[in-house]
Image (cartoon, rainbow, N blue to C red):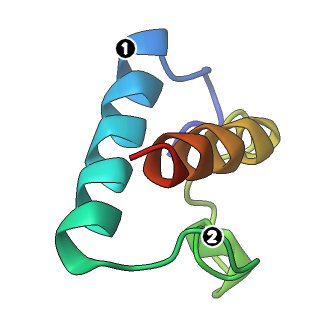
Amino acid sequence: NYTPETPAPGVIASLKDLMVWKFVVHGADPNPAYAIVAHNQLNPTECPGKRTDPLMPGIRADVRARVNGL
């Protein structure tokens, strides 16, 4: 839960790498609006945290660009 602090750049980079790998391995399409969501978009939870929520649009865009570029 990244409410008290912002995730380090390396954490976000690792998350993006993992997501790209999962999309490629499973042949999934990262482009639908529901393809990349945070836990708190589906259930009443704090995860991924208030400091990560604003990063989600950039994470989605970067993952989509990398998967679509392969």
The answer to the question of whether label 2 and label 1 lie on touching residues, with beta carbons closer than 8 A, is no
Q: Taking 61 as reference, is 7 left or right? A: left
Image coordinates for residue 58, horizontal then vertical, percent: 73, 36
Question: Which residue is depicted at the point 30% across and 78% down?
Answer: 27
Q: Residue 26 placed where, x, y %?
A: 23, 78
Q: How many marks?
A: 2
> Which label was assigned to residue 37?
2
Q: Amino acid at mark 2?
A: Val
Q: Quadrant of residue 13?
A: top left
What whole-number distance in Å separates the C-alpha atoms at marks 2 and 1?
20 Å
Residue depicted at 60% across the width and 21% down the height: 5
- In the picture provided, is 5 more to the left or to the right than 41? left
Q: Quadrant of residue 55?
A: top right
Indicate the secondary structure of the residue bearing disc 1. helix
**Residue at far top of view:** 9
- The residue under the point 47% across, 13% down is 8
Q: Residue at x 71, y 33 (%)?
A: 51
Residue bearing the label numbered 1? 10
Amino acid type at image mark 1: Gly
